[in-house]
Every structure is written in C-alpha cells, then in structure tokens.
Amino acid sequence: MRHFTCVHDIGDLKAALREAFEIKKEPFRYSETGRNKTLLALFFDSSLRTRLSTQKAAMNLGMNVIVLDVNQGAWKLETERGVVMDGDKPEHILEAIPVMGAYCDIIGLRSFARFESKDDDYGEKILNGFIRHSGKPVFSMEAATGHPLQSFADLITIEEYKRVERPKVVLTWAPHPRSLPQAVPNSFAQWTAAAGYELVVTHPEGYELDPRFTAGARIEYDRDKAFDGAHFVYAKNWSAYTDPNYGKILSRDTAWTVDARAMSLTDDAFFMHCLPVRRNMIVTDDVIESPRSLVIPEAANRVVSAQVVLKRLLTDNY
Ligand code: AN0
Ligand code: CP
C-alpha cells in the first residue's frame, strides 16, 4: 500500500480485519517496525480522537511523531496556482508540501471539505496535492470526501459486537446546527458495502449522498421503517450533497434525533457515532449513555485501525 485514502487501498478487507484483531491483542509486537521513521500528522481542521489515536498508533510502532496544526503557527497557505500572491497568504502549498515531505517518512493529513467548490472537494484537491508533491506515502485522517480510518474502526467494532453473520446496519441522518461534510457517511457506506452487511441509509429528502459511495444500499426516507429490525444504528449529520444545495443545511428537524422510541423499533440495536457528538441534537442522553451505546469502544478502536494502516505503509514503503 503506497497511500491510504479509501477502502480500495486496504485490499482484502477480511485480511485487514484479522490483522486488526492481532494488533489489538498484541499492540507492541511490531514496536521495531517504525524505528527511526517519522510521522508528520498535519491538521488543517480540529481533532481530538484522530490526533491522539494516530500518535498512539505511531508510538506503538516505535515511530517518531511531529504534529502540526497548520492554521496555528505555520504560514497561511495559498492553494490556487497562478494567483499574484499580494494578499494575506505568504506561502504557496506547492512549496510547503515538498518541504514538509522532506522532514518525514509518512504524512497523515486532515483537511475537510471547504464547500467552496464541489469539484475541488470531490476531486480531493488538497489530499491529491500531497500525494503528488510530497514524495511520501500519505494517509487520510479525514479529507474532503472520506474518513477511512474512522470507517475501518467502525467495522472492527461491528465485527466485535455483531450476533449475526450479516447484520442489518442503518446509517441515519440527524440534525446539527452547522454544515458538516459528507466524509463520514460516504466512507461508512463504502466500507459497510465492502464488508457485505445489509445497509439502509435514512435521511430527509434532499440529503441523498453521492451514489458512488452508497451503491448497494437501500435508501429509505421513512426512518421508522429503516430502523425496523436493525442490529446497528449509526447516526451522523451531513450537509446536502446534491446541486444546487451542496454544503447547505436543509433541515433542522429534531424528529430525526435518535431517541429511545426510535431505538425500540430495532432488534435491540447498538448505537454508534464517530464523535464528537452534540447531545440532544444527534442523540438523546439516555441513548448515548445506554449499555447499547458503542461510542467509546468505537473511539478506542481508532488506535487499532491507525496502527494497521501505519504498519502497512511502513512495511510496503521502507
Ligand atoms: C466532523 C465531520 O462531521 O466531518 C468530524 C467528524 C469526525 N465533525 C464536526 O466537525 C463536528
Ligand atoms: N471521530 C473523529 O475523527 O474524531 P476527531 O474529529 O476528534 O478526530
């Protein structure tokens, strides 16, 4: 694996899951693999889990880690080519990327959708810029259209808790006061399809995701019908994908908040969310605090997914 940006990069998913459980059992077995190798973890956007779990995974592999919050202390970066740089941005990303590549062996990148241009976001302009110009293996720590480390951790969690071979998994939209990217639901749909689960996606009309990610899923606008018999409920807010509403909030309807009544329609489903979560917008206190809530084990598995990916990037490239 040269880079890690989506489910296709991981190859045989079953083998990757087996590797994850092996690493979870023996996290320090490969503590020499990353010796004298440096991870540069670059954040253009905020993070708690990704920042900490990726560092922990790198440390378990014996790596050195540099973390940079690009917007705090580094020069503001111009991303357009051809502009006269007489404004507030002193450095161009076309110099900054190879410079950063010179100081490390692997680059982790967090750079959310900007909602300024759907083509730039869905063309993964920033992530692909790092792949093209850094000269180093690059992995996504949530880019514009996907959050593969999250989905990999979600699958590890589902595999640990499922009671049937092919569980019914429901991805449900829920309200949020700010415009959020489609990265988490896109990846979740793509990875659960690759895992062969039954996937139902439910949301108000107008929130249809890019069909390239939801291929094979059933879209159900009636949430009660979607929840019927579910084994896992995965809640997430996202903004509209379809034109002309790309990046917009179309609904704030709190009837979509996941509550005990909705969960009672399921087959005693587990509740999942990638976090950070806004309580009583996305999910009620009682549901997220219930014994069926997996949000903490899910977050803990982020170390495992990051460690599998880093180990493969190290062994395949160095
Ligand atoms: C981000 C998102 O929705 O993509 C990160 C989730 C892991 N969430 C927020 O910005 C609240
Ligand atoms: N789930 C997740 O990626 O969390 P952070 O945004 O805190 O990293």
Image (tube, rainbow, N blue to C red):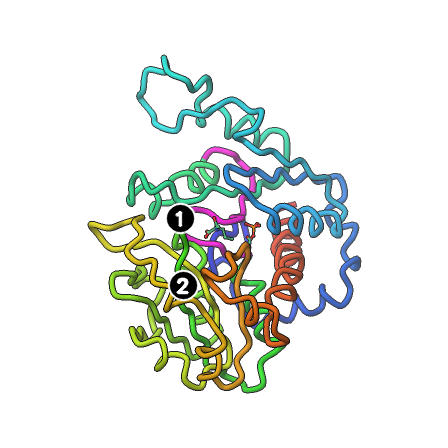
Is label 2 within 8 A of ligand 1 (CB to nearest ligand atom)? Answer: no
- Compared across the picture, whether 211 is left or right of 236 comes to left
Q: Which residue is mark 1?
A: 178
Vertical placement of 144 versus 40: above or below? below
- Residue 164 location in percent, x, y? 54, 87
Q: Position of residue 193 (x, y in %)?
A: 43, 71
User: Does 122 sit above or below residue 229?
Assistant: above
Which disc number belongs to residue 174?
Answer: 2
Please tell me which residue lies in front, 241 or 131: 241
Q: Residue at x 44, y 26 (%)?
A: 94
Task: Please report the bounds of the magenta region as a residue range.
Answer: 133-149
Residue 197 makes an appearance in the image = no
Mark 1 is on which residue type? Arg
- As for residue 163 lying within the magenta part, the answer is no
Cβ of mark 1 under 8 A from ligand 1: yes
Looking at the magenta stretch, what is its main secondary structure? loop
Q: Quadrant of residue 287?
A: bottom right
Q: Amino acid at mark 2?
A: Ala
Q: Locate residue 227 relative to residue 84 in the image: left or right.
A: right
Q: Residue at x 62, y 55 (%)?
A: 306
Q: Is residue 130 visible?
A: yes
What label does residue 10 carry, if any?
none
Q: Residues within 10 Å of mark 1 (few under 14, many from 20)?
A: few
